[in-house]
Amino acid sequence: METDTGGPSSPPACDLCGKPAVYLERHHNRHLCGDHFIADIEERVRRTLRTVAGILPQDRVAVALSGGKDSTVLLHLLRRLLPRADLVAVTVDEGIDGYREATLRSADANAHRLGIEHITLTFSDLYGKTLDDLAGVQPARACGICGILRKKAINTLARRVGASKIATGHNLDDEAQSVLMNWLRGDRDRVLRRPDEGAGPGLVPRVKPLGGIPEREVALYGILKGLFVELPECPYMHTALRGEVRGILTSLERDRPGTMGRVVEGQRRLSLQLACIPRAARPLRSCERCGDPATGQLCQACRLLDSFSGPGARVSPGW
Ligand SMILES: [Zn+2]
Ligand SMILES: [Zn+2]
């Protein structure tokens, strides 16, 4: 029994059961033991699944499984919290030398362990080039290029497996970073995006069950559950604006717990208010090259691929 919790050498005790704590929830100033930490995460994700990330019993869910920490935790949590759901794991291999091998192996092992069907699509198959080829001499552009092309690849995979929803492993840190990056870039369209935008024929709706969970809590959950030991980080991670924004937000969160949650919640409220303002519907078009939804003649991915003049950088018609 842990009765002596006040001594200078004693570890802090769980505020719920008195066992040694493994985590301090700084936002609520609450210590939690391993079991209570796991239960807390599962309850919060369950709530998200019931509300904002609604997954219906009849849904076939394509789980975007990169093989990294977040998506590995997502796959396990979805299997655990929705034991009867129709899940299929989909992985996009962007072609990132020295990083992808380990995460692809991990993705396959995790899907196999859970008995979940797993399929992979490579950038080479879909676009005729790897991300390393495309980023080439401009590694600072890698994350931007990858974001657009991976989104399209996951949507392509999801349609191919007949999924009605895509679940991604974005966590609270990712969400807060995206909000701040949109403001820093002055990206009016994204700042003012309404909740229903981004939906349309051909686009499989996306849900983010981990969107309310901080990155370090996702990682700790995975470690406590023994889901991964150590996984490599994407080598392009620190080359982009996102890397800098990540540093700023992490530092703000440390000094002012709850900052990231407030950034995301503020944007969500703005988005909901915008939905109440009447506006003429934007006409939906199809990309002239690949048929995906587009705002102009070409979709964002095809416009991007056009900016690389090299041969082969086209969406393969086979997909
Ligand atoms: Zn406890
Ligand atoms: Zn297109």
Image: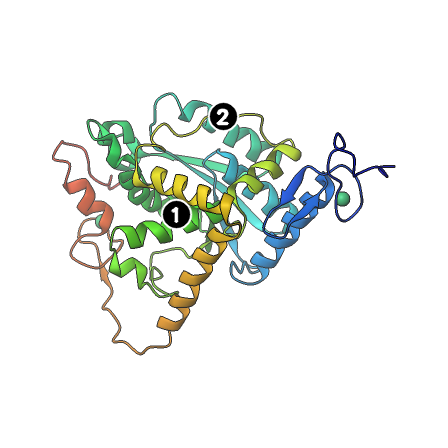
Q: Residue at x 56, y 29 (%)?
A: 109
Extreme left residue here?
309
User: How packed is label 1: few (under 14 Cα within 10 Å), some, or many (20 or more)?
Assistant: many
* Residue 112, position as x, y percentages in the image: 58, 32
Classify 211 as above or below 245.
below
Tell me the residue at 47%/23% (across/down).
Answer: 102
Pointer 2: what residue? 105
The x and y percentages for residue 240 are: 30, 37
Could you say whether the residue bearing mark 1 is in a helix, strand or loop? Answer: helix
Q: Is mark 1 within 8 Å of ligand 2?
A: no
Q: Residue at x 39, y 50 (%)?
A: 159
Mark 2 residue type: Arg
Residue matched to label 1: 177
Dot in front, 2 or 1: 1
Q: Quadrant of the C terminus?
A: top left
For the question of whether residue 170 can be seen, the reply is: no
Farthest bottom residue in view: 278
For this orientation, the residue located farthest to the front is: 8
Split into 4 quadrants, where in the image is the N terminus? top right
Residue 292 showing in the rendered view? yes
Q: Secondary structure at mark 2?
A: helix
Q: Of label 2 and label 1, which has the lower sequence position? A: 2
Please give the count of numbered marks on the rendered protein. Answer: 2
Q: Please say if the residues under marks 2 and 1 sit with CB atoms less than 8 Å apart.
A: no
Residue 30 is situated, as x and y percent measured from the top left of the image, at 67, 48
Q: Nearer the viewer, residue 106 or 169?
A: 169
The three-letter amino acid code for the residue at tag 1 is Gln
- Estimate the x, y position of residue 83 in percent, counting from the top left: 65, 49
Residue located at (59% from left, 61% from top): 50
Confirm if mark 2 falls within 8 A of ligand 2.
no
**Where residue 59 is drawn, which disc sits there?**
none
3D distance between C-alphas at marks 2 and 1: 28 Å
